[in-house]
Image (spheres, rainbow, N blue to C red):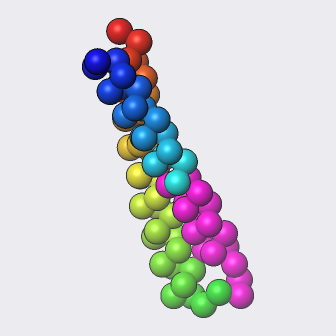
Amino acid sequence: MDTLKQGANYVSETVQGTGATASKEANKDTAKDSSASLGDRASAAKDAAGDKMEETKHDASATANKESAKN
């Protein structure tokens, strides 16, 4: 039963990591957009950094769940 739970957690964390990656990339594009206001660009850069932290956290958790499910 734990293996099934770890597998489900792996899928969940992978999906959340993918969402964070998509958000990070969108924010990076906004931060680089010279037609966006300086405030919007700065906010997008800050959000991209936060998204990167979320992406890393979810990827690490997914890897841990995947390894747990193997054992």
Q: Report whether 26 appears left or right of 68.
A: right
Quadrant assignment for the C terminus: top left
Residue 63 percent coordinates (x, y): 43, 28
Residue at 57% in and 80% down: 41
Q: Establish if 26 lies above or below 39.
A: above
* Residue 67 image-quadrant placement: top left
* Front-lying residue, 50 or 10: 10
Q: Establish if 52 lies above or below 40.
A: above
Q: Report whether 12 appears left or right of 29.
A: left
Is any atom of residue 64 visible in this view?
Answer: no
User: Residue 28 lies in magenta, yes or no?
Assistant: yes
Q: Establish if 26 lies above or below 64.
A: below
Is any atom of residue 11 visible in this view?
Answer: yes
Residue 28 percent coordinates (x, y): 61, 66
User: Residue 46 lies in magenta, yes or no?
Assistant: no
Which residue sits furthest top? Answer: 71
Q: Is the magenta stretch mostly helix, strand or loop?
A: helix
Quadrant assignment for the N terminus: top left
Residue at 55% in and 60% down: 24
Which residue sits furthest front? Answer: 1
User: Which residues, given as a range, are shown in magenta?
Assistant: 20-35
Tally of numbered tags: 0
Which residue sits furthest bottom? Answer: 37
* Front-lying residue, 15 or 63: 15
Q: Establish if 55 lies above or below 61.
A: below
